[in-house]
Amino acid sequence: MNGPRILLIVGGGIAAYKAAELVRLIRKEGGSVTCVLTEGGSHFVTPLTLAALSENPVHTTLWDLKNEVEMGHIQLSRQADLVVVCPTTADLLARMAAGVADDLATTLLLATDKPVLAVPAMNVRMWGHPATRRNVATLRADGVTVLEPDEGPMACGEYGPGRLPEPPAIWQAIAGMCGPDARPLAGKHIVVTAGPTHEPIDPVRYIANRSSGKQGFAIAAAAARAGARVTLVAGPVQLTTPPGVDRVDVETARAMAAAVEAALPADAAVMVAAVADWRAADEAPQKLKKDGSGEIPPLRLAENPDILATLCRSPARPPLVVGFAAETETVIAHAQAKLARKGADWIVANDVSGDVMGGALNAVHIVTAAGVESLPEMPKDQVASALVERIADALA
Ligand code: C5P
């Protein structure tokens, strides 16, 4: 038995019968399964069925004193590689998103530090309801992998998305999350910068730019999912820290430079931040005032350190340094020039003349000494996954 060890939480929906089939499939593929059955789940499939198929005891309650003495229920996921919630009903999805822990299944899900795969199955309207949409988005932001349900005729007689995917498709997702390729950056340290910098003019005013930090945060999240230890040096943005990421908040370019240096050594650095090229040369200690004379105070600028170029020349240079280039014209040519000027290994170039900054989509070109790879426009988290895949290949 050298396949994945799965803790399978079976929720209360008609699709629960397919969970029994999933147990058989996981075992056929060489994995092992321990089942947790919710109160609702036990109306659709019996503990005996799951125990017989998994050849393991089935856990149904938090209040089982015998087992609580033998092994804390909260620790059930300790021996698992992956927690699979199948089927994830609308109710279970909502309780997971809210962090409710009112039964064995939700208590385990709140206590586990293992990756979680949720396989939803529910009525088409429930799946489309704004509350469910919000809950799915929350869970994904929390690092839970939520599979998309299949589309087709449903047990309730309606048609649409909401059906449990077939067990072979669920197995494929499980294998993808547990297989040897699932954590290709395990043991690696990746430093990512993200967001804008704020360069103070006086205590209330600053120079900034339109960077949202979304692309950098997505890269940090993808690297962490791939098993890396990630230090995310973030400029001032209101974004949630991705699960498993060490975040260092900074305001200015100089503070960002110091934080990057302090984070070394690293196996790779991905400099996504839109660092201000200039800061106010003379930061006023008090708020600049209009004095009625009509005189406009001069704003003298001083050059900020180039964090990327400095890192590339540093004796502690990570083996792979990736810069970004936000351009509004001749994107690739500028990126090629930047590659040479800064000494980076790759420059990821994007055209920000549209609404990329702050938006959800991005189309990038990966420019290296070997050539240019252009990716189609896609959501920023997919750009992040594609990039992290290439980083893992480069560091392998
Ligand atoms: O020169 P430019 O600002 O276009 O270069 C962009 C790349 O350089 C990005 O990777 C950005 O994070 C990095 N950079 C930096 N420090 C600066 C300016 C840019 O690290 N002062």
Image (spheres, helix red, strand yellow):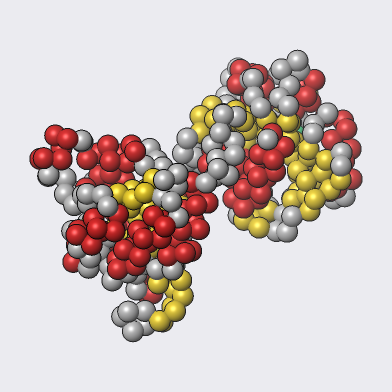
Question: Residue 92's image quarter?
Answer: bottom left
Res. 76 image quadrant: top left
User: Above or below — where is 337 with respect to 313?
Assistant: below
* Location of residue 62 with respect to 39 vertically, above or below: above
Q: Is residue 347 left or right of residue 118?
A: right
Total numbered labels: 0
Q: Position of residue 249 (x, y in %)?
A: 54, 28
Quadrant of the frame with the C terminus? top right
**Foreground pick, 319 / 333:** 319
* Left or right for 56, reference 267: left
Q: Residue at x 23, y 62 (%)?
A: 49
**In this orientation, does residue 266 appear?**
yes
Q: Residue at x 46, y 58 (%)?
A: 171
- Pick the residue in front: 7 or 121: 7
Q: Quadrant of ligand 1?
A: top right
Q: Quadrant of residue 111?
A: top left
- Look at the picture and state if 118 lies above or below 239: below
Q: Residue furthest left?
A: 65
In the rendered view, tell whether residue 263 sits above or below residue 139.
above
Name the residue rendered at 54%, 27% in the picture.
Answer: 248
Residue 245, given in percent of the width and then of the height, sits at 51, 33
The residue that appears at 16% across and 45% down in the rendered structure is: 62
- Left or right: 174, with 188 as reference point: left
The quarter in which the N terminus is drawn is: top left
